[in-house]
Image (cartoon, helix red, strand yellow):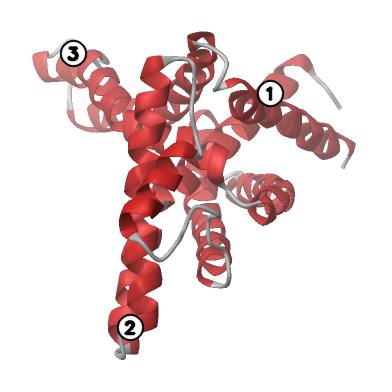
Amino acid sequence: MIKNIKLYIATIITISLILFSWKLFYSLSCFSFLFPIVILGIVSSSFIDTKMNKRRCFKNCYFQNNSIFSKILISSMGVVVFYSIFSIAFTLSIMYGVISFPYQLWLYLLIHIALVILIYKKIIKSLGGTVQDEYLNIFSREWAINITSIILFVIYAYIFYNGYEPEYLVKDLVQTINNASNSISSSCLLIDYLLRFKTELDGTFWWIVSNSSETLKSEVLKTAIWVIFIFINSLAILGINRIIVQIVYLLDKTFSRKGIE
C-alpha cells in the first residue's frame, strides 16, 4: 500500500511537470517545445517497446538466431522510424488538448491515475505465474492501456456531450474561427502555427456540431456527428492515457530495482 501511494504521488508529480509545464510555458518561447518532444519520446517508446518484444517472441518461435529473417525481425530501425512518426499525431493532439481541456477532465485525471495503478497492479498479480517474468510487466502495461483507455474515453465523451462548450463559440462560423484563433498564441512561430491550425479546425467542428444539434431533427444523425467529433479529438485523451500508464510502468520498474518499499 505504501509503495502504491509513493507510485501515485510520483506519477502525479511527473505528469504535472510534463503536461502543466507545457500548459504554462507554451506561449513564452520555442524552448517550451522541449515538453512535446518529451511527450513524443514517452508515447513512441511505449509503442516501440511493445512491438520489439512481439518481434523477439516471433523470432524465437520460428527462426534460428543467426538467420537473415531473424536479423531483420530484431532490427529496430524500421520500428523506431514508423512509430515515431505515428506518435506525432498523438503528440500534436496532446499539445492542443492540454491547453483546452475543461477543468472537470483534469480533476478526473487525479482519480484516473489511481485507477491506472490499481488496474496495472491487479493485472500483474493475476498473471503472475502465467506470463513469463520478462514479459509480465510489458504485457500488463498493454492490457492496462487498453482497459483504462476505454474508461477515460467514456468519461471524456460524457463531459463533452453534456454541457461543455468553448468560450469562442458563437452563431457566426467566421467569427467562431477568428475567436478560436485568437484564443491561443505563442511567441514561437512553429508552436503558434500548429496550435492555431488545430484550434481553428476545432472551432469549425464545434460550430458544425452546435448548429447541427439545433437544426437537425434526426437524433441518429446528430449523435453520429457528435461521435465523429469526439472520435477526432480523442487522440489527445488516448495519448495522455498512454503517457500515464507508461510513466506508472517506468516508475514502478525503477522503484522495484531500487527496492523502494
Question: What's the residue type where badge 2 is placed?
Answer: Thr
Residue 213: where, in percent of width, then height? 38, 78
| Residue 56 sits in quarter | top left
Q: Nearer the viewer, residue 185 or 84?
A: 185
Asked where in the image residue 231 lies, by quadrant, the reply is bottom left
- In this view, the residue in front, 13 or 184, is 184
Residue at 50%, 42% (x, y): give it.
Answer: 97
Apparent side of residue 134 relative to residue 234 in the rendered image (left or right): right
Number of dots carrying numbers: 3
Percent coordinates x, y for residue 223 in the rendering:
36, 78
| N-terminal-most mark, 1 or 2 | 1
Considering depth in this image, is 227 or 60 the residue closer to the camera? 227
Label 2 belongs to which residue? 215
- Which label lies toward us, 1 or 2? 2
| Mark 2 residue element | helix
Amino acid type, label 1? Leu
